[in-house]
Image (cartoon, rainbow, N blue to C red):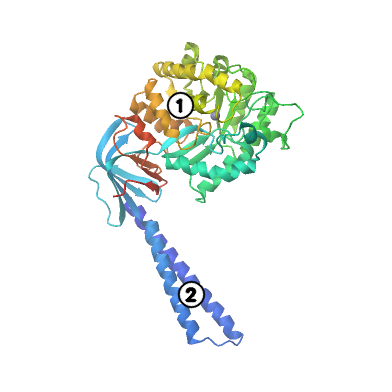
Amino acid sequence: MTSNTHTFSVLSIIRAFGIVAITNYAFNFTYSNIQTNCYPISPYSMKLKFILLFALTIIFCQLVAAQSRLKAIKAGKVIDVVSGTVLNQQVILIDSNTIVNIGSGLAIPANAEVIDLSHATVLPGLIDCHTHITSQPSGDYYGDIFRKTPMDYAVTAHIYAKRTLQAGFTTCRDVGAAAFIDVALRNAINAGEIEGPRLQVATLFIGSTGSHGDLNGFSPFLSFQLPKEMMGVADGVDALRKQVRYNIKYGADVIKFGAGAGVLSEEESVGAPQFSLEEMKAIVEEAKMWGRKTCAHAHGTDAIKQAIRAGVASVEHGSFLDAEAIQLMKQQGTYLVADIYNDDYIMSEYKRLGYPQKILDKEQLVGRTQRESFAKAVKGGVKIAYGTDAGVYPHGWNGKQFYYMVKYGLTPIQAIQAATINAADLLGWKERIGSITKGKWADIIAIEGNPLDDITLLEKVKFVMKDGKVYKNELKK
Ligand SMILES: [Zn+2]
């Protein structure tokens, strides 16, 4: 650890001196040019040069100090999601964006910035495996569909990204966005241009003609002027393979498709399969060839089973599970990502938000059964990862689902594991995120109180660090 830090500091100092030297050279070069052009250098210019060099040196020294600064978090309690236990009085040492050590009584290096969370409970950054971070209902259902363009969504997406991060969710798997807005958002966050969670993005939701992924309930003469593939609608094995390639070509990290019908769309059914098994297998196989995992939107029992048989990494929603579906998920190691909070929001708010009655009727069919299915899956030992469908309800409320997961069968520590190590495993990032472990990225949050006693405390995250950078600290004394 220390040798790494030293190497880093030495390199930074060499870099800083290098820049100052180059600036000096540039100055001399400019002035010698001015001189050859017969402008004499005045004592005034020399003084200016000295002042500028001095200021630059100070700025770079400060930069060096900031860059090389180690961080040490003094944690009152740490939820160790790997062992499922609570550790007391821990020190977490962070170098740049990486956790370099954790333990009790660790020596804190003299040059480390100390973050005092000794009265708080510290957890790994939370992970939401099912978000639509680029949008949320505005209250004008038809306006959102017909009066907005992808540009409208693109200019507001960063607001939702920031809210999500501030809520303690340092990573999200975003499973469906229009016009590659999610790719632009992911890239801007990674470049440090805007604040938001680290994103794994699915880009276009892949659906069949007339499916949940298509635009239904309107005149056949109505269409959007987009490249055909940008609708994400494809039928048949060859077209679906091409659609997967198109999504990946323009930035998809993961492939999402609609195995069956949906709730928040105007096609008639809610549970029917919307791709054949052959089509689902083609999607999964093609995605795998390009090194991508696949997740399937599926409420209905047959759609769920076909998606599992096709080999998806996770079933999203999973509303109508039967014993065979649960057995299949266990056999294949398929994750269940069930959004069991948002029914409350849809039933209480969607009428006001202008959604048609037929959508509300569908939610009524699904909501309660989905929670019962979740409880059955927990009892049956299915792997559970945390995913909320944020975007169906306001971004930043991602933590509200913990309460429901505990109410419907998980222990508090299992609910936290669903949003940390399990989620990291589903994303294929378990070596990098999901626990406060040496070598992982420094994604760390803190709350007041013990979430194992009151899981709703995770709705009030007070401290957020992502990649070693502090984005929120309401625990400062
Ligand atoms: Zn969704």
Counting from the top left corner in percent of width and height, residue 213 is at 63, 27
Query: In the image, residue 389 lies at what x, y percent?
Result: 51, 30
Q: Does residue 430 show up? A: no
In the depicted structure, whether residue 422 falls above or below residue 189: above
Residue found 49% across the figure and 12% down from its top: 322
Kindly identify which residue carries mark 1: 341
Identify the image quadrant of residue 34. bottom right
**In the image shown, does 107 or 453 lie closer to the viewer?**
453
Mark 1 or 2: in front is 1
The residue carrying pointer 1 sits among few (fewer than 14), some (14 to 19) or many (20 or more) residues within 10 Å by Cα, namely many
Name the kind of residue labelled 2 in the image.
Asn
Q: Is residue 147 left or right of residue 296?
A: right
Local secondary structure at mark 1: loop
Q: Which mark is residue 24?
A: 2
Q: Hey, which residue is sitting farthest front in the picture?
A: 352
Q: Nearer the viewer, residue 460 or 92?
A: 460
Is there any visible trace of residue 51 in the rendered image? yes
Comes first in the chain, label 1 or label 2: 2
Q: Within the image, what quadrant is residue 215 found in?
A: top right
Disc 1 marks a residue whose amino acid type is Tyr
**Residue 261 sits above or below residue 256 on the image:** above
Residue 460 versus residue 58 in the image, above or below: above
- Asked if residue 251 is positioned above or below residue 210 in the image, the reply reads below
Q: How far from the left and from the top, in percent, is residue 317?
A: 51, 23
Q: Nearer the viewer, residue 203 or 286?
A: 203
Estimate the spatial distance between the alpha carbons at disc 1 and disc 2, rounded to whole Å. 61 Å
Q: Quadrant of ligand 1?
A: top right
